Image: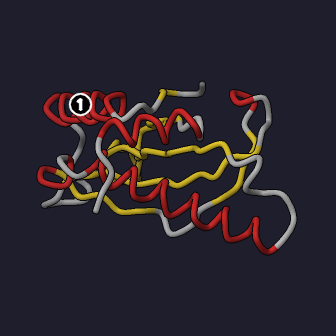
Amino acid sequence: MGRSDGEWTDWARTHRVAYEITPLVEMRDGEKLQVGFTLSFYAEAEAELAPGAEDAEASERLKQELAACADAALAAEARVARTEPDPESAVMMRPENDLKPEVCLSWRIFHKDEYLKPVNDADREGLAICERRLRELGLKRGHW
């Protein structure tokens, strides 16, 4: 059973979950073309990343919860766009979060019918709807 929006909001606040959206750019005929967006999620993981086997399990659980949160946020987007998770997850330290360890998971969002189709105004409007959903789930843009 999935979490309710209120439960996701509490979870996002506890783990200080933030997101970033950047252009997904490819080359076509020697020119840069924006074909979609990259949506990256960051969850603070200072406690989960301490040394030890038990902490490794906690870190993996955090990654799984972050992926489930992203699925909850991207469910509506999947109807109009294709989303692909980046197979690489990473632990990083961003200046925006005072260099505290964070788990990062990213998704690429692009046209369902054609990967190299340029982004248009309707796509940007769809992204705005997705961003509203992220905020409803308690995520912050950039950092906490």
Q: Residue at x 78, y 39 (%)?
A: 100
Query: Dot 1 lies on which element?
Result: helix
Give the color scheme: rainbow, by chain, secondary structure or one colour: secondary structure
Q: Quadrant of residue 43?
A: top right
At label 1, counting other C-alpha atoms closer than 10 Å, the crowd grade (few under 14, some 14-19, many 20 or more) is few
Tell me if residue 21 can be seen.
Answer: yes
The location of residue 118, given as percent across then percent down, is: 23, 44
Q: Nearer the viewer, residue 118 or 14?
A: 14
Q: Nearer the viewer, residue 72 or 47?
A: 47
Up the image or down, 81 lies above or below 141; here it is: below
Check disc 1 and give the amino acid type: Arg
The location of residue 103, given as percent across then percent down, is: 64, 52
Q: Quadrant of residue 36?
A: top left
Q: Residue at x 59, y 41 (%)?
A: 15
In screen coordinates, is 141 left or right of 33? right
Residue indicated by mark 1: 124
In screen coordinates, is 53 left or right of 60? right
In the picture, the quarter occupied by the C terminus is: top right
In the picture, the quarter occupied by the N terminus is: bottom left
The location of residue 8, given as percent across then percent down, is: 39, 42
Q: Residue at x 12, y 54 (%)?
A: 79
